[in-house]
């Protein structure tokens, strides 16, 4: 979704940011490094969440922090609902999905074994 959104909005982004690369997170996304670290802490339930939340608040302000938390919560909700009811991966995203998975080397994660190849 990030790549398509960036293309649609004619914004440069570096998808390697999803792998935790701070330099990549800074490309095309205001407060990218802070947002990435906040998101990583949320997803991993890391003990440094409070510090990263404060760092995002200090860098970007309360409106960005609230939006980031809302986006993260909504994404978790959507993924869980889709998984629970068995929504399949959309066929039209197959080729792009394969390209993104290869570019980001997502097969290296143990959870990749649970993903259906498209």
Image (cartoon, rainbow, N blue to C red):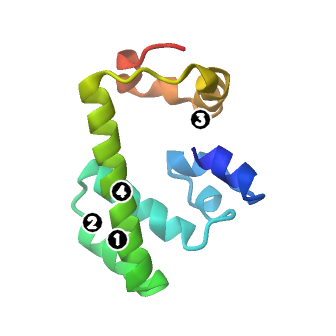
Residue 12 x, y percent position in the rendering: 75, 57
Please tell me whether mark 2 sits on a helix, a strand or a loop. Answer: helix
Q: Can you tell which of label 2 and label 4 is closer to the viewer?
A: 4
Q: Nearer the viewer, residue 82 or 54?
A: 82
In which quadrant is the C terminus drawn?
top right
* CB contact under 8 Å: marks 3 and 2: no
Residue 76 x, y percent position in the rendering: 31, 46
Please tell me whether mark 4 sits on a helix, a strand or a loop. Answer: helix
Which of the 4 image quadrants contains residue 53?
bottom left
Residue at the image position 24 percent from the left and 28 percent from the top: 84
- Label 3 – label 4 distance at C-alpha: 20 Å
Please tell me whether mark 3 sits on a helix, a strand or a loop. Answer: loop
Q: Which residue has dot 2 on it?
A: 49
In which quadrant is the N terminus drawn?
top right
Label at residue 104: 3
Q: Which residue has dot 4 on it?
A: 72
* CB contact under 8 Å: marks 2 and 1: yes
Residue at the image position 57 percent from the left and 29 percent from the top: 105
Residues packed near mark 3 inside 10 Å, few (<14), some (14 to 19) or many (20 plus): some
Of the numbered discs 3 and 4, the one sitting upstream in the chain is 4
Of the numbered discs 3 and 2, the one sitting upstream in the chain is 2
Q: Which residue has dot 1 on it?
A: 52
Q: In this image, 117 relative to 86: left or right?
A: right
* CB contact under 8 Å: marks 2 and 4: no
Which of the 4 image quadrants contains residue 23?
bottom right
Of the numbered discs 2 and 4, the one sitting upstream in the chain is 2
């Amino acid at each position: 979704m990030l790549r398509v959104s960036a293309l649609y909005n004619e914004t440069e982004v570096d998808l390697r940011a999803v792998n935790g690369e701070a330099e990549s997170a800074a490309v095309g996304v205001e407060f990218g490094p802070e947002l990435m670290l906040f998101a990583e802490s949320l997803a991993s339930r890391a003990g440094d969440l409070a510090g990263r939340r404060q760092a995002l608040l200090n860098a970007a302000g309360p409106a960005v922090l609230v939006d980031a938390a809302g986006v993260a919560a909504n994404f978790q909700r959507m993924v869980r609902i889709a998984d629970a009811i068995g929504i399949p991966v959309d066929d039209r995203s197959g080729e792009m999905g394969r390209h993104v998975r290869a570019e980001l080397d997502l097969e290296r994660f143990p959870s990749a074994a649970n993903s259906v190849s498209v």
